[in-house]
Amino acid sequence: MWYEFLNIFFFVFHTAFTLFNVVGWAFPKTRKLHLITILLTAFSWFVLGIWYGWGYCACTDWHWQVRDALGYHDRSDSYIHFLLLQLTGINFTKQLVDTVTLSIFLLTALLSVGLNIRDWRRKSRG
């Protein structure tokens, strides 16, 4: 029962975290938090990724451990690929998913940094 709860928790939390990474920059009240989540994601992918493999995500790793304990063996190389497969039933290529995911991540990271700098400058002038 605990693993079922964790499985649902990871679906909800990780999906919400991912969606926030995509759109959190757009709202002035969430920009600082968005910058933090983007930096955490970058740290996981690019720093922890040195040891665990490019794009490593602790949430994905933990979710896969939970799903293994439940007897599920349907995981993908990435959470985004897994989520797309679960939601649409379409098995997109790993390269397509990775390319689109990285592109969106880089765009949102640039938007977050740029808008946070702009907001900070406006606040310090005002």
Image: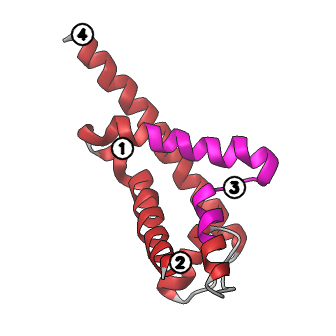
Q: What residue does disc 2 label?
A: 3
Local packing at callout 4 (Cα closer than 10 Å; few below 14, some 14-19, many 20+) is few
Main secondary-structure element of the magenta-colored stretch: helix
Q: What residue does disc 4 label?
A: 125
Whether the residues at callouts 4 and 2 have beta carbons within 8 Å, the answer is no
User: Gap between marks 2 and 3, in whole Å?
Assistant: 22 Å
Mark 3 or mark 2, which is nearer the start of the sequence?
2
Amino acid bearing label 2 = Tyr
Whether the residues at callouts 4 and 3 have beta carbons within 8 Å, the answer is no
Q: What residue does disc 3 label?
A: 56
User: Gap between marks 1 and 4, in whole Å?
Assistant: 22 Å
Q: Residue at x 49, y 76 (%)?
A: 2
Identify the element where label 4 is drawn. Answer: helix
Identify the element where label 1 is drawn. Answer: helix
Amino acid bearing label 4 = Arg
- Asked if residue 44 is among those painted magenta in the image, a careful observer would answer yes
Q: Which residue is more in the foreground, 74 or 3? A: 3
